[in-house]
Every structure is written in C-alpha cells, then in structure tokens.
Image (tube, helix red, strand yellow):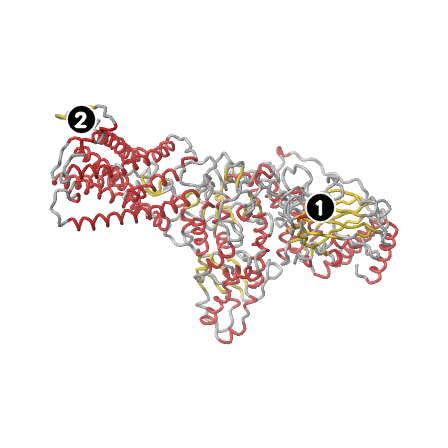
C-alpha cells in the first residue's frame, strides 16, 4: 500500500520541478497549432491563450503522462483491494472492523483525489490533440486541493482519536464527506464563473506547460491552491508530530491540557503494549502508524514543488539541479524519441488542399468542361509529379472521352499558379503551399476555419523545359529529392558516412515511402531507414558555431576539439541545414549550430543575425518565420526544429512572412524592398535611405540577393561624367544595321589591342561568343538571365570563396586548361587541378612523420619514389601534400584555424624515396548554396567530389607537377563534378592489419592502417615545352579546340 501511495504522488514533483524551470538558454517553443497541420495558421488566432509548447514540455508531458498512468493504475488497484476487502469484512459486526471507521472513508476520498490527479495529467494528451483544456485544468485543481483537504482531514481525525481520545459519531463522517467535496467543487467552479476576467483570458488555460489556472491569475493560483497545500502540509506535520509524541509517551493529555515529558528509550511505546486485542485503540494505533507514510511523502514532495513555483514567481531561475528526475539537465527536445516521433508523424500525416484546374484551351475535343476542376487533399511530404497518375485517372474517367484520353501524355503536363508562376517540381507540396499562400491577404482566423486551397492551373501540352528546373517526371523528382537528402546529411554531420552506409535498396526505400504516401505504414517504413541519418537525441556540445553561407564548405564547425564527438558519432550533430525563403529572391541556404556559447541556439538569434532588418534583436520584429505551415516562435531551438520539424529531405524550410504595423496583417516584402531599406514603416516615401549591407542582413547569406542596390545620393549631389580619355578609333565603322556587322565591327576594334596574344584571345572570344549567340538564336530573356547569373556569381566571391573558380571547375574549363598546359609526356605522371584549398604555410615534416593530428581519420601510410622519365631517382624534390579530414573538410575551412593540419611539406631522399603518415580522405560536396549550386541542380548533376589526396612536386629544371590520387573504392570517381579524376591517377588502397607494422610506422592506436604506394614520374621543362607545342598542333589540326 505504501508503494502505491508514493507512486501516485511522484508525478506532482516531477511535473512542476521538471517543467517550471526557466533555463538561461531560452527554451525552445513550438506552436500548439503545429499539432494540427490542417490548420496551418491557427496559432495567430490564439493570442493570449498560452499557445506555446516548449521543448522541455514536449518531453515532460510524455514523462508526465507515463508516470500518471502508473499512478492511475496503482490507485485503481488499491481502491479495488480496499473494495474487495471491505466486501469480505461487511459480514463482520465487530467494532474492530476498520472499514466501519472514519479514517477509511477519508482515505478513500484521498485516493479519489489522486485518481483525479492522474486523470487530469493523462488528459494532457487530449489537450495536445484538440485544446480540451478547461476540463483538464479543473480536474487537476480539484485533485490538488482535494489531496490537501483529505490529508488534513485524516490528520485531524487521527489526532482526535489518538491524542484527544475523541470518537466522532458516524453521522459526522458523512457530513464531512459531503461538506469537503462540496467545498472543493465550489472552489473549482469559483474560478471560471466568478473570478474569470475577460481581459486576462480564460481562467483554466495552458499555464506554461499544462492546463491549469492561467498564468495571469497568479493571486488565484497561490490562494486557491498553493496556500491550501501549504496549510495542509504544515498543519498535518504539526498534528502528526503530536501523534508521534503521544504514541511514544512524550505527550500527556488530561482535562484538555497538554503536558510534555521526556521518556527513556526502553520505556517508549509502553502505554500501548498492554491493551487487549479486542480494544479498538490497538487497531487505530496500527492504522495510524501506516498512515504516517502518506503525509510524510506528501510533505517531502510538496516542498520542492513549491520552491520551483515560488522561484518562478519571484523572477529567479530555477536551478537545473531541481530537475531531479532527469538524467540530462539540458532542455533539449531531442532527449526523448517519443516527442520527436510525435511531431514527425504529425508532419508526415499533414495535408494541404489543392484546387487544380485544367487549362480550358488545352482540353481535348468533347471533354466535359464543367468538371475540369479537381480537388485533392495532398500530403505535405509528397511532390507534384506523384499526383499525376491520380489526376489522370480522374480526367480520363470523368472529363475526357475515349478519344481525348488517348491524345494526352502525362509527361507533357506541367503546373503554374493563377499568376503564371511555374510550380517547382522538386519542392514538396507542403513547401509549395506555404510559399504561394503566405500573401498579403493572410488574415487572422479561427482554428476551425478550413484552409483555402492553393489554386493551380494544369497544362496538358508544351512544357516550358527552358524554364523548368527539372523535367516533369517522377524519376527526375526522385533524383532531386535524394540529392537534397544527401546534401542535408553532409551538412548535418560533416561527412557522408551515414548516407553512403545505406544500401541502394534502403535509399530506394526512403523514396518509395514518400512516393506511396499516404499508405498506412509509410511513416514507419521511412523513419526505420531515415532515423539512421536524422538525429533523435541530444547533439553534442559544439564549441563555436559554423559560419554562414559566405564560407559554407569554406568554414565548417570550429576546429576546437573540446567538444569533439565521442565514439558514437551518430548522436553528435554538427549543424542544422536550413533554407530561408524570401519573396522575389533566390532560396538562401545555410547551416546553423545546435548550440551557441553553451546554450541552445534559437530561431530568433539565428534570424536576427542573418536578417536583422526584419528581425532586430532589440526592437519589434517586422516578420514571422513559418515552418511546416506554422508561425514558429522565435524562441524555438534550431536543434529541435532540425529533429522534429525538418522536411522529409532533411532541410528546415523557413518561410519569411512580414508584418505590417499599420494593419496588423501579414504581407511579403519584396527582395528589392528589403535591400533598398524601405521596409521600415516610418521610412520617408520620397526616396530610399542609404543602407549598408551590414544594416540589411548578414552579408554572407543575403548578398547574393542583391542585383543592383539603388541608393539615392544624399543632398542630391551630382558630379559630371568623365570619359576614360581614349580617342575615337582612327577608322570608320559601319552602323550596326545587321547582326553580322556587329561581329565584324568588334573584330575590327580588336585591331587596337596590343600585345598580340591578348588580341588573339579577344578575337577568338568574339568569334566563338557571337557564333554561340547566332547558332542558338539567344533571346533577350535568356541573355538577361545569364547576366543576372554572372552578377550573382561575382557577388558570392570573397576572400575565402571564389565562386568563379567554382563555375570554371563545374563547366570543365579548369580541367581543360590544366590538360592543355600539362599534356602527357611519355610515361610522366598526369596532372590534376589544383583546387581552391592549397596554402603555402604547411609544416615541414621528416620522412615517416604525420601531416595530420591524431583523431582526424582512418590511418593512411603513403610511400613512393620520385623518378624522371628514364626511371632515375630525383633527390631533394619538394613535395607538398594536403587533404580533407574524416569530416570532409580542409583545415582552412575551419573557423579560427589554429595551425595547418592535414597538410605538410617534405623532400625526397637521395634515392628519390618519400614516405609520410596521413588519413584516408573522404568524398565531399563543393558549395551548393550559390548560383553554381543552383546551376548544377538545373543540369541534374550532383555536386560531389570523390575522395582524393593532393600532391605537388617542385624542383628546378623540372616541370612542377600538381596532381591528386583517387582511391578506387569511391563510386564518384567517374562523375567527379570538377572533372579532376583521371584513369592513371586512380589507385588501390591496401589494408594492412598488423600491430607491429602500425607501431613501426608511428601509428599510435589499433593494429590496422591503409597503405598507398605510388611512384611519381616528373618531366623536365624542355620535355614539357616540346609536348605542349606538339599537342597544340594536333588540336589545331583537328579543330577540336
């Protein structure tokens, strides 16, 4: 019985001390509206109603419900035992029948209060589902004060019997039962019927973390609950101390007067050891001893409960040590898989309404033109190509006749909005809905008001393939989805081990679950595989956050190893992959750390850093972030969003909807307005303010949005335009009346160029560029798109990133220039591209030393010889080598790089031999957040480089060889995004398993390492010069240039 009693109250301490803490790391919140995705914007209609669930609460509610279920079970079982025992004893007429006593009735009432407490806590699930809060709050208050009243009643009754010797009549028991329960009901009813104030909102509502008396009724919370509980606890404690002293013999009662005395240990309890067994007092003493357990447990539990609540009321932070039932004091919502699964399932099962109209001009003859509109509740995680077959069945069965049905080809279908905006096939349907429905017409509405459907126009012919990012097919959609999933995996963990570790059938299974949605088992099938990639538990502490997209893949998370992941790297998230959607601008792609300076990184901090004009840190924000159709609070933890609110492709998609102070409604600022600085509602309408990039947004993330920033000169000061001082050409040029005259005039102007090599280059540039324009019949729109692309490419360049080199690489120009300038010379080792990560500050190392610090990856031993074309060793060759670590990053990509790592400089010995320790490099993606990344998506190309080891060989008299070796186990070798891999440079890594060999080579741990043995052959300067001349002749002869 004692165990059941204690279990039934454990959740009291757990609930308040677990939830009522205010962490300095700003606990994450998510709108309760997130729990019903059919009501994407309902949260705005619940202002003032305590509408948030913190990440701690999400965990805690789950724990509370579980513990409350245990409490409910214990109380019900105890009541059944009492009932059965009472029925058996009902035939006994003895005065010692305990079930005929007052204390039993009071104790049963106490258990009923515990029963109500458990039911009220379990009802939190009902609240989570449909906001049924008032009944849960009322039941919880009745349970709390009921417990207090009945504990005090039992204490008073026990005191009367054992200390005062007063035996109340049976009628008094019934009077007390009716009176106390009536008083409890009156106190509960008083709130909503008498004390409720319209300005404060509902009396019973979401109070911080559960349904109870709303937080604006602080006085009522104290007087009508905590004060009652304290009075009960203190009074019961005093009464039971007196009972204890009386039973022990320290307290004497005579004539209504109390007298205390000291009693020797051997004489204690003597007054009650000589009573006859039939005496009722013996039984009451026995019962009283057992009943002491409950109020003692109650008083022990109520002290920390009240301490947590009072600390909160006085504005103090509750120490994390008060959360005594939690193994991890951090408030991360990753900590329980149950809460993560809840939100993932809600996102997975969420749907949005679509209203699809077939373009009337494209309907086949004899179609039923009154039924060409199709309504569908589409899954948020699905894609438009996956709806084609269902739409086709409807059209064939209802709209088209048999002849018309034979004419249509679904591969020609495409969608656009009523405003003629093409729908992106590679965006999920939920993302498309959020992007196209978050407009200036968005108003506040009630939660039960249905969502307006997104109206789409379905075209049956002539897809604009020149404008569509992807061909409208399921296979193209699959490839785009898998590419985004893999990129998110790399950004989240810093490597591709998890995705590449999945078998092809498992990777296909991820897409098949999306494709077949809403089949009943798809959620489990998807997450059975995806959970190996996406986190569900607390990420490891990260010492410093990764930078923004200005140096994405140029500066990953800090190299500080103090927070290095443990052996189980699956639970150590480096970054949260994020995409921000602003209207009239490209998608902004970035990564964010899960923690910052020891605290959890919130959405508000992230947005105030990257878009401070819309999300200032000190002033009222001008915008709302929308995630999965929900207006997400700025206090939401990014780590929690990454685990619970990411799309099926692994990305957290944040839609920015901006708020107008004048109307209180939502609108979308255009990108032009944002970057002209005109979003301030108080800004003058006569012109734009001069606004620096740092005032508008974080440069690295947003500068790619800026085509041309219009800045009006202050004071209207104007200076005279000045020429460059060069005269007009000394020859006449015909007016460019025809296209061919333009090309001829350009070539004639090139005769002014000196030196000859420059003239030659510009002649060829004009000839080939103009020929390209003529052959392709280039349109003005296409050329302006190219101009904007090149403009954005230049704007992405910085000291740590060269987007134009990236463009040159992916177009094959870098590899082509390298091949032309380093033609094959006999048996000499072929060259490869230098890449952007070479530096000249590598440490000098001796033969056999390591270029990588310990813990940077799997051990690799590299050895070989440097030879000339005749096979003779070349001594004293300077060898530069550099590579990635096991996260796929070069050392220069880390923020605050302490010193060179995974790179080194050594020399060949007198026999041309060299050897050094390294780590096995891994594959990595080139930056995908800029215009080049977007280009690769349009070209249906991945952005991955295979794993490789860079090496450079330098010696006077010999041509400098820049090359790289590519392990053959990487499947990306053949499709290297920058065309760097060559057949002769693909090598095999041998696995050596010998502790003796490992120690002999200087490896500190384990008994296994990889061996790479390769001899490099250098060409002399003369040999290369001759080879280049011969190669140029061959190229010119074949016209392949």
Residue name at image x 47 percent, y 51 percent: 628
Q: Is residue 948 left or right of residue 147?
A: right
Count neighbours of disc 2 (C-alpha within 10 A) and say few if under 14, some if 14 to 19, many if 20 or more: some
Q: Is residue 691 left or right of residue 637?
A: right
What x and y, as percent, mark residue 860? 69, 49
Looking at the image, is mark 1 or mark 2 earlier in the sequence? 2
Q: Who is closer to the viewer here, 93 or 614?
A: 93
| Discs 1, 2 touching: Cβ within 8 Å | no
Asked if residue 531 is positioned above or below residue 544 in the image, the reply reads below
Residue 727 rendering spot, x and y as whole percentages: 82, 43
- The structure residue drawn at horizontal position 37% and vertical position 34%, both measured from the top left corner, is 308
Residue 1039 on image: x %, y %: 81, 61
As drawn, 149 above or below 506: above
786 and 38: which is toward the camera: 38
Q: Position of residue 993 (x, y in %)?
A: 66, 52
Q: Which residue is mark 1?
A: 1001
Return the residue found at the far front.
266
Indicate the secondary structure of the residue bearing disc 1.
Answer: loop
- What residue is shown with label 2? 252
Q: Is residue 784 visible to the viewer in this orientation of the structure?
A: yes
Which part of the image, by quadrant, shows the C terminus?
bottom right
């Amino acid at each position: 019985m004692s165990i059941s009693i204690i279990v039934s109250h454990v959740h009291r301490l757990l609930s308040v001390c677990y939830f009522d803490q205010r962490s300095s790391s700003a606990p994450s919140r998510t709108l309760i509206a997130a729990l019903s995705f059919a009501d994407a914007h309902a949260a705005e209609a619940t202002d003032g109603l305590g509408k948030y669930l913190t990440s701690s609460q999400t965990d805690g509610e789950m724990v509370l419900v579980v513990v409350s279920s245990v409490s409910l079970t214990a109380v019900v079982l105890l009541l059944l035992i009492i009932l059965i025992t009472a029925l058996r004893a009902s035939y006994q007429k003895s005065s010692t029948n305990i079930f005929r006593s007052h204390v039993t009735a009071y104790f049963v009432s106490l258990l009923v209060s515990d029963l109500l407490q458990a039911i009220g806590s379990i009802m939190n699930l009902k609240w989570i589902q449909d906001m049924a809060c008032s009944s849960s709050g009322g039941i919880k208050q009745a349970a709390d004060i009921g417990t207090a009243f009945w504990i005090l009643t039992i204490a008073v009754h026990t005191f009367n019997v054992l200390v005062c010797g007063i035996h109340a009549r049976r009628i008094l028991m019934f009077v007390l039962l009716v009176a106390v329960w009536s008083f409890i009901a009156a106190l509960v009813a008083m709130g909503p019927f008498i004390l409720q104030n319209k300005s404060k909102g509902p009396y019973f509502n979401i109070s911080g973390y559960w349904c109870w008396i709303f937080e604006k009724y602080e006085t009522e919370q104290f007087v009508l609950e905590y004060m009652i509980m304290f009075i009960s606890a203190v009074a019961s404690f005093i009464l039971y101390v007196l009972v204890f002293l009386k039973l022990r013999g320290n307290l004497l009662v005579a004539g209504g007067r109390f007298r205390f005395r000291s009693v020797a240990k051997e004489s204690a309890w003597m007054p009650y050891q000589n009573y006859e067994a039939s005496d009722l007092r013996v039984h009451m003493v026995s019962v009283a001893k057992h009943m002491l357990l409950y109020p003692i447990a109650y008083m022990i539990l109520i002290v920390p409960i009240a301490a947590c609540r009072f600390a909160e009321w006085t504005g103090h932070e509750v120490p994390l040590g008060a959360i005594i039932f939690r193994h991890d004091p951090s408030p991360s919502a990753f900590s329980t898989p149950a809460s993560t699964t809840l939100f993932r399932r809600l996102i997975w099962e969420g749907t949005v309404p679509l209203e699809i109209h077939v373009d009337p001009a494209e309907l086949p003859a004899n179609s039923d033109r009154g039924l060409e509109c199709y309504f569908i509740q589409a899954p948020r995680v699905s894609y438009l190509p996956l709806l084609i077959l269902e739409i086709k069945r409807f059209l064939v069965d209802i709209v088209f006749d048999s002849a018309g049905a034979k004419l249509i080809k679904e591969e020609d279908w495409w969608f656009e909005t009523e405003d003629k905006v093409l729908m992106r096939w590679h965006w999920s349907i939920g993302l498309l809905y959020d992007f196209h429905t978050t407009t200036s017409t968005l108003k506040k509405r009630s939660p039960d008001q249905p969502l307006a459907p997104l109206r789409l126009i379905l075209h049956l012919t002539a897809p604009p393939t020149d404008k569509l990012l992807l061909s409208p097919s399921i296979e193209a959609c699959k490839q785009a989805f898998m590419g985004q999933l893999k990129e998110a995996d790399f950004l989240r963990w810093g490597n591709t081990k998890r995705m590449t570790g999945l078998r092809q059938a498992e990777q296909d299974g991820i897409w098949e679950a999306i494709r077949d949605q809403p089949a009943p088992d798809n959620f489990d099938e998807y997450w059975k595989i995806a959970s190996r990639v996406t986190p569900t538990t607390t990420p490891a502490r990260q010492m410093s956050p990764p930078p923004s997209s200005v140096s994405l893949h140029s500066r990953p998370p800090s190299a500080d190893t103090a927070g290095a992941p443990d052996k189980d790297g699956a639970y150590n998230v480096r970054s949260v992959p994020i995409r921000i959607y602003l209207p009239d601008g490209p998608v902004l792609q970035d990564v964010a750390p899960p923690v910052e300076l020891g605290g959890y990184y919130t959405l508000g901090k992230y947005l105030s850093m990257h878009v401070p004009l819309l999300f200032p840190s000190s002033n009222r924000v001008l915008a709302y972030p929308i995630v999965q159709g929900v207006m997400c609070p700025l206090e939401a933890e990014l780590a929690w969003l990454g685990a619970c609110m990411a799309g099926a492709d692994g990305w957290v998609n944040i839609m920015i909807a901006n708020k107008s102070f004048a109307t209180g409604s939502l609108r979308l600022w255009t990108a032009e307005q944002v970057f002209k600085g005109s979003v301030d509602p108080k800004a003058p309408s006569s012109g734009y303010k001069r606004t620096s990039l740092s005032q508008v947004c974080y440069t690295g993330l947003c500068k790619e949005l800026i085509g041309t920033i219009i800045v009006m000169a202050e004071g209207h000061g104007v200076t005279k335009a000045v020429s460059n001082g060069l005269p007009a050409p000394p020859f006449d040029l015909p007016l460019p009346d025809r296209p061919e005259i333009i090309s001829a005039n350009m070539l004639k102007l090139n005769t002014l160029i000196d030196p000859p090599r420059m003239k030659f280059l510009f002649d060829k540039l004009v000839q080939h560029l103009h020929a390209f324009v003529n052959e392709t019949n280039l349109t003005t729109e296409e050329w302006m798109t190219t101009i904007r692309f090149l403009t954005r490419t230049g704007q992405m360049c910085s000291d740590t990133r060269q987007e134009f080199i990236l463009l040159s690489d992916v177009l094959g120009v870098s590899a082509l220039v390298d091949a032309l300038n380093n033609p094959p010379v006999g048996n000499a080792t072929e060259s490869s591209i230098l890449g952007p990560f070479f530096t000249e500050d590598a440490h000098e190392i001796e033969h056999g030393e390591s270029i990588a610090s310990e813990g940077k990856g799997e051990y690799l031993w590299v050895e070989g010889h440097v030879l000339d074309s005749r096979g003779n060793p070349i001594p004293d060759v300077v060898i530069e080598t550099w590579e990635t670590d096991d996260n796929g990053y070069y050392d220069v990509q880390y923020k605050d790089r302490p010193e060179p790592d995974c790179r080194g400089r050594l020399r060949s010995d007198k026999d041309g031999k060299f050897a050094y320790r390294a780590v096995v490099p891994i594959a990595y993606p080139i930056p995908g957040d800029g215009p080049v990344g977007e280009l690769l998506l349009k070209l249906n190309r991945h952005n991955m480089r295979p794993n490789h080891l860079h090496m450079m060989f330098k010696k006077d008299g010999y041509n400098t060889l820049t090359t790289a070796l590519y392990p053959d186990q990487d499947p990306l070798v053949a499709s290297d995004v920058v065309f760097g891999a060559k057949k002769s440079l693909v090598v095999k890594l041998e696995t050596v398993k010998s502790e003796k060999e490992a120690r002999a080579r200087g490896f500190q741990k384990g008994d296994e390492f990889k061996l790479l043995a390769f001899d490099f052959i250098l060409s002399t300067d003369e040999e290369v010069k001759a080879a280049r001349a011969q190669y140029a002749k061959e190229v010119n002869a074949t016209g392949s240039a």
